[in-house]
Image: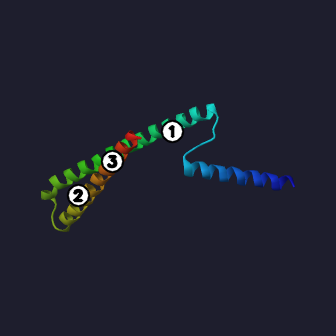
């Protein structure tokens, strides 16, 4: 009988959480909001850091592709084709990483 009441309370709690997520309202006490705000700021700080690292990695890929493009003249035969393909992939990946991460970082700052 005790197990059944525990299961019921868990189901009620899950239902309450789902309702709060849908409406955006919470029934938290005065101390809980401060804890949630601190967790949110901590998470935003981490995501800003991650986006910064992604932007730096994307910029590095673009830098590598630029160096590959400069050295195309020294490559011969099929090596030249490999260098061109690699430079193109590095440019696309790096620019994409920079653009997407910068957009998400800007959106994160607006919240």
Q: Residues within 10 Å of mark 1 (few under 14, many from 20)?
A: few
Q: Are marks 1 and 3 in contact (CB under 8 Å)?
A: no
Label 2 or label 1, whichever lies nearer to me, is 1
Mark 3 element type: helix
Position in image of residue 29 (x %, y %): 64, 34
Residue lying at 15% horizontally and 64% vertically, measured from the top left: 76
Residue depicted at 73% across the width and 52% down the height: 10
CA–CA distance in space, label 2 to label 1: 39 Å
The residue beneath circle 1 is 40
Q: Earlier in the sequence, mark 2 or mark 1?
A: 1
- The vertical placement of 96 against 44, above or below, is below
Q: Are marks 2 and 1 in contact (CB under 8 Å)?
A: no
Q: Where is residue 50? Give x, y as percent.
A: 41, 43
Q: Is mark 3 in CB contact (under 8 Å) with mark 2?
A: no
Mark nearer the N terminus (3 vs 2): 2
Secondary structure under badge 2? helix
Q: Nearer the viewer, residue 27 or 43?
A: 27
**Does label 1 or label 3 sit earlier along the sequence?**
1
């Amino acid at each position: 009988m005790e197990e059944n009441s525990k299961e019921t309370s868990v189901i009620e709690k899950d239902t309450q959480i789902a309702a709060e997520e849908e409406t955006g309202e919470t029934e938290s006490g005065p101390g809980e909001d401060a804890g949630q705000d601190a967790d949110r700021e901590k998470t935003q700080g981490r995501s800003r850091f991650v986006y910064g690292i992604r932007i730096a990695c994307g910029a590095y890929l673009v830098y590598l592709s630029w160096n590959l493009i400069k050295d195309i003249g020294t490559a011969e035969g099929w090596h030249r084709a490999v260098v061109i393909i690699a430079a193109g992939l590095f440019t696309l990946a790096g620019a994409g990483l920079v653009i997407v991460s910068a957009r998400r970082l800007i959106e994160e700052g607006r919240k």
